[in-house]
Amino acid sequence: MIYHHLILRVVTKVLVGTIILFALYVQFHGDFSPGGGFQAGVIMAVAFIIYGIVFGLRNVKRVFPEWLVHKVLALGVLIYAGTGIYAMFMGYDFLDYDALSPAHPTSGQHWGLLIIEFGVGVTVTGVMVAIYYAFAGRPPSISNEDW
Amino acid sequence: MADTAQIVEHTARTFRDHLPVLQVLVPFCTAPLIVLLGSRRLAWPLAFIASAIALVISFIMLMDVREGGMLTYTMGGWAPPLGIEYRVDAANAFVLLLISLIGTVVLPFAYASFRDEIKSRDHTLMYACWMLCFTGLLGMVATGDAFNVFVFLEISSLSTYVLLAMGADRDRRALTAAYDYLIMGTIGATFFVIGLGMLYMATGTLNMADMADRIADQGMNRTVRSGFAFIIVGMGLKVAMFPLHLWLPKAYTFAPSAVTVFLSATATKAALYVVMRFTFSIYNPDFAFATNTLEIIFIPLAVIAMFSASFVAVFQTNFKRMLAYSSIAQVGYMLLGIALLTDTSLTAAILHMFNHGLTKALLFMGVGAYVLRANGSFYTQIAGLGRKMPITTGAVVIGGLSLIGVPGTAGFVSKWVLVQAALERAPENAMFLAIAVAIVLSSLLAVVYVWRAFEVLYLQEPDPNSTATEAPLMMLIPMWILAGGCIWFGFSTDLLHDTAAQAANGLLQGTKGMMVLTGQGGAH
Amino acid sequence: MSKLLDLQFLAGHAHYLLFIVLMMTGLFIVVDKTNLVKKIVGLNIFQVSVFMFYVSIGKVSGGTAPIFPMDDKYHVDKDALLGIAYSNPLPHVLILTAIVVGIATTSLGLALIVRIRESFDTIDEEDILNIEQDMTRADNQKHGNAMGGPA
């Protein structure tokens, strides 16, 4: 049994799930209320970061390994660009969401925005977690008092 | 979202229509692709293929708009002025060609240079950053929406800071150089945003053509004028205009060699293009003339840059640092071309952008070869290498002659046109005659510092312990391609001169030149 | 006297004064402080003032949040749509972009500071300048003075 920071550990375990759920809510309600990809990505990253702060970098890297973070980062950008390129293949302009559903342009716009915001959210999550890993993963060569 | 099925009238786009966006999209998608694949062996080929495709696209676009007219592209199908559009006319296409040409030619050089200077586990991410920098520069130039310029400016700047900092493996001063450039560059970009905000307040639009239209309607008021001031200062920092140039010597000296080659030939030129676009197309030339901005501010600063930077370059002991100071002086020439406000002088400025890009890239490639073989770029380290590395130094000699402006090289053509432009305006004011003399005098200073390099390379005894041999083929071929370009464009000037003249004409027409607002795609 | 103290003008333009104060504070911190982290903080303050400047552009007097009114079935209520004044959402979008750029710049600056700390053992600008001057002096001794010297 681990007794150090017991309250922190218990509360974090409860919070992490709620934070991820809230992030997904913000992500998909971007067109009805303030929200969208960037905000949701940051909130989602917070879930991983708070887990990393309380439980240690090694443990959070078992959940979200570093190589996966970098791949997810790139994948989000490619999802965004991919939607645009798909529109180009369909004969429309780059990022013209009408291409996603030519018969119902409004529906196409709706879907297009959802997909690109998803890409943005994924990338931002990856970036924030990667920044955290980069900073936290560097071993300090001097003790904190010497700063 | 159920509405009755409606087939919307729509003409399918062809490949040629998509060219303006593909120019930016191809490198932009390559960067995450390189990261996703994560393989060091695939990184360089992917980067090279993307750059080559970008080069071909920019060449096709230049051929399309060479005689006048422009290519437009609406992003997402939203018509301007509400939507973002990409506009490529002669000035644009010229700079795009320069950037993609240098980007492609430098990559084989970078392959050999990175293997020596940078830890191999960083290579994949280096190429990804390189592609992002490339994207940012291309996007900055290709776009026709003012805020889009800021977005791509920051993409290119952030990747530049990373690329610069990678020089820390050789010399830790690269880190502070990157940090200083970060602080200064961010302040510059934020000033640009402030200026843009003022313009948005005054005109209500971000589309460059529409903004030009509305400013012409409005006339001058304080908001528009202070917006201009902020934009010029913000972009001037990126251009390395005289008092705002302090980041450049350190950044170019301590960056990895291939990075310096790429940045010296493209980054300041792209920012200078933005300055030209804002000064001439968005704000009319009459505005700049009426407020005497160009005469009172640009001309003195340009002349001071030309002389002071050349003087400092004369006294350097490091070849790379000397070339960095020389860059600041050459930017002074381009600013002078802008400030003289005639067709000829603007042609000279645009020509000099291209020629100086070729020349500086060639010279910094020579430096990179010396760093590879002689492990340094100080004059004491490269002494006598002219005899041990004859092919490399031959290319460096051609670059040096082009930098001075010897007839028969590309550098001569642009300086000649610039002097011509100054003499054209000489009858109205003796100051312009003095400016023409100043141009010639500072070229004489260039003779001094370039000749010093030649003397070190050829007339001094090499270090007896040096094991320098000829540079590898992957470095020699790009160098001689650029050297050949310097000589070719020194003799066959028509293509470049006519394109630059067309570009200058388009820019000087001011808001009228922007008014070819149309619907979707295609040349006009 | 009333021309100097045009209260209506001041009340309408007071927020610009706030932006300028913040902007100059940020710039002053960047220039004055020698600690590298504090410079980044100053840069952030400078950028925040610009964000606020943009957001203030978007406000339309009497305008509400630019979100379509919904009826019970989550369809756009077209009748209520007409008659509402909306604030301009475009500056907000521009600022989102600028905020993200600011975050990227800050994290990059901080990463550079970490590397500088590991390399130079200090993050005070003056100490770093001294170290670099020593390095330059050593270079000059080895490779010749910048003023004259060999060649």
Image (cartoon, coloured by chain):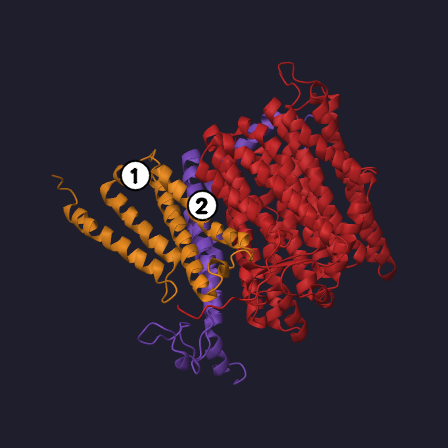
Q: Say what amino acid the circle numbered 1 marks.
A: Lys
Q: Give the chain coloured orange.
A: A
Which mark identifies residue B183? none
Above or below residue C89? Residue B75 is: above
Q: Residue furthest bottom?
A: C2
Colour red, chain: B
| Picture quarter with the N terminus of chain A | top left
Q: Identify residue for label 1.
A: A61
The chain letter under disc 2 is C
Q: Residue at x 68, y 18 (%)?
A: B462
The residue lying at 50 percent from left, 40 percent from top is B128
Label 1 secondary element: helix
- In the image, the chain rendered in purple is C
- Give the quarter of the image for residue B12: bottom right
Check disc 2 and report its element: helix, strand or loop: helix
Residue pictured at 48% horizontal, 82% vertical: C8
Q: Which residue is mark 2?
A: C108
Residue depicted at x 18% and y 46%: A9
Relative placement, left or right, of A126 versus B293 is left
Query: Left or right: A8 with respect to B283?
Result: left
Q: Residues within 10 Å of mark 1 (few under 14, many from 20)?
A: some
Name, please, the residue furthest toward the right: B427
